[in-house]
Image: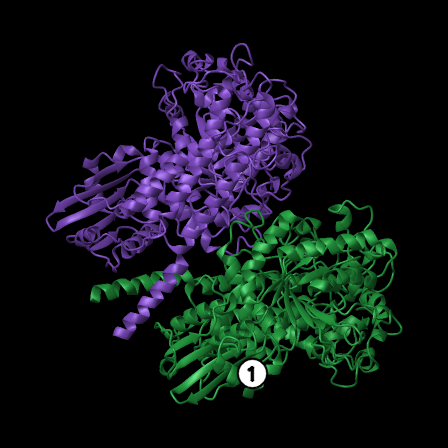
Chain colours: A green, B purple
Amino acid sequence: MKKLFQLFFYLIISLAVQAEDGYSLWLRYTPITNNETRTAYRNAIKGWQVAGNSPTLTAAKEELQNGLNGLLGQTLPEMKSGAGIIQVGTPASSPAIAALIGKSGLKDKGADAFLIQSSNGNSGATIIIAGNTDKGALYGVFHFLRLLQNGSSLKNLSIVSAPKIQHRILNHWDNLDRTVERGYAGFSIWDWHKLPDYIDPRYKDYARANASVGINGTVLTNVNANALVLTDQYLEKVAALANVFRPYGIKVYLTARFSAPIEIGGLKTADPLDTAVQGWWKRKTAAIYRFIPDFGGFLVKANSEGQPGPQNYGRNHADGANMLADAVAPHGGIVLWRAFVYSNETPEDRFKQAYNEFKPLDGSFRKNVVVQVKNGPIDFQPREPFHPLFGAMPKTPLAMEFQLTQEYLGFATHLVYLPSLFKEVLDADTYAKGAGSTVAEVVDGSLEGHALSAMAGVANIGNDRNWTGHPFGQANWYAYGRLAWDHTLTEEQLAEEWIRQTFGAQQALVDTIRKIMLTSHEALVNYMTPLGLHHIMGYGHHYGPAPWYDKAPRADWNPTYFHKADKDGIGFDRTAKGSNALAQYSPEVRKQYENVNTCPEEHLLWFHHVRWDHKMKSGRTLWEELCAKYYEGVNSVRAMQKSWNNMKPYVDAERFEQVRMLLAIQEKEAVWWRNSCLLYFQTFSGMPIPAQYEQPDKTLEYYKNLRFPFAPGNG
Amino acid sequence: MKKLFQLFFYLIISLAVQAEDGYSLWLRYTPITNNETRTAYRNAIKGWQVAGNSPTLTAAKEELQNGLNGLLGQTLPEMKSGAGIIQVGTPASSPAIAALIGKSGLKDKGADAFLIQSSNGNSGATIIIAGNTDKGALYGVFHFLRLLQNGSSLKNLSIVSAPKIQHRILNHWDNLDRTVERGYAGFSIWDWHKLPDYIDPRYKDYARANASVGINGTVLTNVNANALVLTDQYLEKVAALANVFRPYGIKVYLTARFSAPIEIGGLKTADPLDTAVQGWWKRKTAAIYRFIPDFGGFLVKANSEGQPGPQNYGRNHADGANMLADAVAPHGGIVLWRAFVYSNETPEDRFKQAYNEFKPLDGSFRKNVVVQVKNGPIDFQPREPFHPLFGAMPKTPLAMEFQLTQEYLGFATHLVYLPSLFKEVLDADTYAKGAGSTVAEVVDGSLEGHALSAMAGVANIGNDRNWTGHPFGQANWYAYGRLAWDHTLTEEQLAEEWIRQTFGAQQALVDTIRKIMLTSHEALVNYMTPLGLHHIMGYGHHYGPAPWYDKAPRADWNPTYFHKADKDGIGFDRTAKGSNALAQYSPEVRKQYENVNTCPEEHLLWFHHVRWDHKMKSGRTLWEELCAKYYEGVNSVRAMQKSWNNMKPYVDAERFEQVRMLLAIQEKEAVWWRNSCLLYFQTFSGMPIPAQYEQPDKTLEYYKNLRFPFAPGNG
């Protein structure tokens, strides 16, 4: 017995060490270490019952079993009834649950809602996890397991939860050759070559992870689209993925290349008003639904950055979107039409172009079209003001597009907790219908009473073992899904949940890592683009700083276009004296920004060209403040490093070392950003970097000569 | 206690299931399941001692500890002396070992040799694992662990082993953008972007796996080379990898782009006789050795398939190789110069060109040059006769280049055990110095007394979790290394070793899987290229059959060039009446092949254009035999499937299911090969596929119209 015990012990040690490679994400289900909590749970939970055997309820059962057995460290039996039973089901699958739901208020909450309720019946305390649909029950199971992982009390549970947003979607910018545009976690997890016959176990784990945070849609392919994915050869592969995802309530979407009727259809035009083109899309869509009966719909990037679109034929975005909307409508599909458009020919401030093109089309889109708008007006910069389209198109459902992949935020080597950014935008007030008209309420449809609502996150997922390259990239995937379900959750709360599930529950660990996460976004803004600087990164690959770059083939791809530094000052004047982009906001928002002296300093250079000697709130000049912020950014990273090093006793060796190495890279690159930006801007300000700071040890020329021909993500 | 036990039990179950994803390769060190064996080992092994603390001996200690603890399922202590001790060291690190080695005969066996010897001293039975160097001791530890994994008796151990080949190298065809040319297991494991600061744990596991089978060199970059890897920016990254590999006795090599002096050196020429060019390479090489003091040397593909080379300047291969050899010689490096050359301009049988170019240069290469020759004269086909250069350049060390990645053998979805192919070539008789002058003896240097010897395997490794895509691809990596160490090992023996280490020791499992492996190569030859057919695969990507293809920009890239099917017959006449390639072999070899009636049928169409009604040994006509072989190939795959399905009780769920799905793809593609090839060749033979066979259910047109725009490995 002792020998066997010893054997088991070493097995555990060796396997546990091996297993902490991040693959399990926040679904590790390792035994609860707090004795009190574990005992309480073991007393409260004696077994489980899942009523029904649909694929989704089977998935729920499998997850509940694995989760409970793992967390409680004992095998719990299937039970018929009795004290301590966890009952899972729907009104359709269980009369008991049908009875209960009548009283709970769950009924009107929709297909995705769930109920978790403890009750004391005749046979003792039980917990019911119910959904109006199988999918709701599955969400309930994941939420219940989350409660356990977070050490929540199981007494008097009475949770009814329904998502605020209907379509909670990941956008993969994955190409058919498995490169991922702006992907930094390896290559695409979709192994197209081996599909449909080889089903990577990863596909199911991907579905589990998404379902656990409420994500219910995935766009498999890059918005810079390839029409071949719409051919039978690929649809067969897409269908195989959809089959894996379906039990987890996840619908598959594809990007539609606007010129597909020409490229794979043999037509001479892709004009959306041409009946042959319309017919082709209808037939093609019907074919897709034959492969994938619950196909979600199309995501389209049209007439943007070289992609074809309706404007090639003198039509507008509504013409294009509506044609596709009509094709998917009979099948229940939707069209997500991106508003990220800007034209090379128009010498207009790029900030303003999406608004200018889309605002006039408000009211002309079909009911099943959502216009998908990036969080800010330029392009996923470390900090942007909210996009002026939010609140400006009351008749059109607008989807929020966030970017989880860190295209402009240090790739997968910088620790940046993005919910800080997400919440800043979601909570921003558009004043569209008076004070309190937040961006979140525009997106969830409540402000204008739209039934259709969507949120998109550009995925940070690749075939790296830990999915996201940086172990902390997982937190952004996690929190994105949770926020799409409920945007009132705070970033603190989501950080804490994620930490407990991903690293452990010791208080010192939770407190320290939470602090690292919550300071990380501001740190990055400071060492990259403080005070409202934006778009000053390397050309093409977007790696590292290049504020000096001015050789791009179009003006608005050049950092110099955006910072406009000169001997007088720095920043883009978007007031009435400048591009007047501020006019796109409601008067209340405009007012916040239009005065250089009262404009929030975090957005200052977004809206004003500011003199180097402008006095800031701190009493410092703008130049001194810029220096202070850049140095503050680097110092924050160094503080993160120190904090992390204290975590060694709490974190497994593999992930500890990974994060340690990545933070070292982040520190090195933060210094690179700081030094090269300050040296460059100094050529305009003519002012010294204050002597109290460590001075740059390389020249501006050195930084300008760095080249990165194989920086990742340029796929 | 019972609860704790239960907890542990479920932990093990959940972790063990998770862990069998193939990442651990043949180094799983799971507890020995045979009770008798485990008891015997536990009685014989009580602890260990590693004398010395160099990085290599530290690695040996770590491996021994992990291996013993895992296999025996108990923690063994470090011991000073006593019965049951495993003592590891070198003469330099331990006086006891120094004394023992005197008698053992190890001393003269070189730096890599090891000794494993059991002895009964005053204090009881002990086992000594010793090397002349730390590296030898490490090899000994890996071999000892292999003995345990294979259930070998520990009584009267007296093993002295030294490699027959000095440089046992993997060639990675990995590009700096992480694509892998002809790679089918995902993308490159070298994450160049994050190097040198981020050290993926995989790098160490890669080194361990290689060291465990005796591989002592790795060429990191593609033979279609990029000069940038020779710049400081990349050498810093290469050095970081070399630092990880060094303790495991693995040297790093790079591919040298011949035109690098122009591309990164700013010179106007790369002429090897130009003193500025020579000087540039000398300085560049010295710089490399400053980064990597034990740098192995250069691998060069020159004047082949568009790569630059000495012939661009009117010089020959020896001029090019010698210039580089002179640069690395002062530092102890070598040059591996590839003989895989063929010219578009020369209307000569491609079979003959390498011989024609290199044979005349025999004797003109520097002492530290090895000419690296592919196993066959064309290009890694499913079966080739041995390359005529073997035995034809007595004054020059010739390295064998095998291809582990299955460029022409079904990518990573076909189960093919390659040692069957390797041994066929290694054991072939060149008759260079009379009967028994095997290719293996040419390569190991023994035939002509060369001290310098090398073997290269083009790696099948990518960032797929299980390294090789197909779980059975691991066997080819494993067996390649073992054969490079000792080419007298049999394919049966190596299969059995690998199975026991990778899947388990149950006899039914070992017997069944071994049979699958040993029949797999002939199966593939039969369903792809029976009877000496070759190079009839898809153009460019090399995926699937395309014997009809004749549109390539050069004649010898077209399948039709190689099979020459017409209404009379099929095959390439390489006798004196044809291209006379046979003249490149010794008379004895030529004689075996030159008569169409006595030529071994497995090579028939390599050397003869044979009439469709030619009578084969079976009594069938050639056409009937071709049909029979193609059908036999498919049937073999179906038999493999059946056998594998019987393995379900013995194999973990994840790998069982993986292989099951992959075999289904293999069966589907075998049918595709068979049907499309027979339908196509039938257009020449005009004969029916005999009625007893299942008839093709698709037309030749269908097969001809298949397109694979994103087939992998075209990087």
- Give the image quarter of residue B19: bottom left
Q: Quadrant of the N terminus of chain A?
A: bottom left
Image location of residue A411, percent across then percent down: 61, 60
Image location of residue B128, percent across then percent down: 22, 45
- Residue B244 visible in the shown view: no
Identity of the residue drawn at 82% across and 76% down: A585
| Amino acid type, residue under disc 1 in the picture | Val
Identity of the residue drawn at 44% across and 48% down: B660
Residue in the foreground of this view, choosing between B59 and B515:
B515
Secondary structure at numbered mark 1: strand
- Give the image quarter of residue A609: bottom right
Q: Is residue B174 left or right of residue A628?
A: left
Q: Please determine whether, in this image, residue A187 is positioned above or below residue A420.
A: above
Q: Which residue is mark 1?
A: A160
Residue in the foreground of this view, choosing between A430 and B101:
A430
Image location of residue A363, percent across then percent down: 83, 72
Residue in the foreground of this view, choosing between B152 and A686:
B152
- Dot 1 crowding, Cα within 10 Å, few <14, some 14–19, many 20+: some
Residue in the foreground of this view, choosing between B682 and B592:
B682
Point out the residue furthest to the left here: B122
Q: Chain of mark 1?
A: A
Q: Please determine whether, in this image, residue A135 is positioned above or below residue B228.
A: below
Point out the residue furthest to the front here: B691
Q: Is residue B306 left or right of residue A467?
A: right
Q: Is residue B465 left or right of residue A613?
A: left
Image location of residue B485, percent across then percent down: 35, 35
Q: Please determine whether, in this image, residue B108 is positioned above or below residue B432.
A: below
- Residue B113 visible in the shown view: yes
